[in-house]
Image (spheres, rainbow, N blue to C red):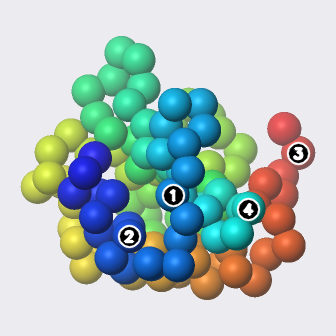
Amino acid sequence: MLYVRSIILNTLPELEERYSYRIPFYNIGKKPMIYLNILKGKDYVDVAFVQGVLLEKDFPILKNDNKRKQVRSIQLKSLEDLDHENFVALLQAANTLLSKSKKAWFLDK
């Protein structure tokens, strides 16, 4: 998680790191963009993109885990699972998308 955190903060230094629900969230202003989580019973770090449903066409690495309506994520079991260049491109695309949005959570629950 620390390696992923360093990539996020180095790529997008304007993001604000906050902790909610005991997990790190990376926000643009008050809008959450990404969060990192370790889910019970899973053996990976869940790198979740709040508006991931809008990014999954361009970034097929994003998965719909747990049947979430809007959030899509990358599941990392090891550092070798992370394609650095693709992840940086994904971060930049998510930043552009969220910067243009009025709110982060746009789908009804």
Q: Earlier in the sequence, mark 2 or mark 3?
A: 2
Residue 49: x and y in percent read 55, 57
Dots 1, 2 in contact, CB < 8 A = yes
Mark 1 → mark 3, Cα distance in angstroms: 25 Å
Q: Which residue is mark 3?
A: 108
Is any part of residue 64 visible from this angle? no
- Disc assigned to residue 9: 2
Q: Residues within 10 Å of mark 3 (few under 14, many from 20)?
A: few
* Residue shown at the point (88%, 45%) measured from the top left: 108
- Residue type at mark 2 is Leu
Say what secondary structure mark 3 lies in: loop
Question: Mark 4 and mark 1 in contact (Cβ < 8 Å)?
Answer: no
The amino acid at mark 1 is Glu
Residue at the top extreme, as displayed: 41
Q: Residue at x 64, y 70 (%)?
A: 28
Q: At numbered mark 4, what does the secondary structure look like: helix, strand or loop? A: loop
Foreground: 61 or 49?
49
Residue 89, percent from left and from top: 39, 81
Q: Earlier in the sequence, mark 3 or mark 4?
A: 4
Q: CA distance from mark 2 to mark 3?
A: 30 Å
Kindly state the secondary structure of the residue where label 2 is placed. Answer: helix
Sequence-wise, the earlier of marks 1 and 3 is: 1
* Lateral position of residue 29 relative to residue 62, left or right: right
User: Disc 1 to disc 4, how far (Cα)?
Assistant: 11 Å
Q: CA distance from mark 1 to mark 2?
A: 9 Å
Q: Residue at horizontal 83%, vertical 58%? A: 106
Q: In the depicted view, which residue is nearer to us: 4 or 70?
A: 4
Per the image, label 1 sits on a secondary structure element best described as strand
Give the residue number, with chain letter if any, for mark 1. Answer: 17
Instruction: From the image, tell me which residue sits under label 4.
Output: 30
Q: Are marks 2 and 4 in contact (CB under 8 Å)?
A: no
Hey, which quadrant is residue 103 in on the image?
A: bottom right
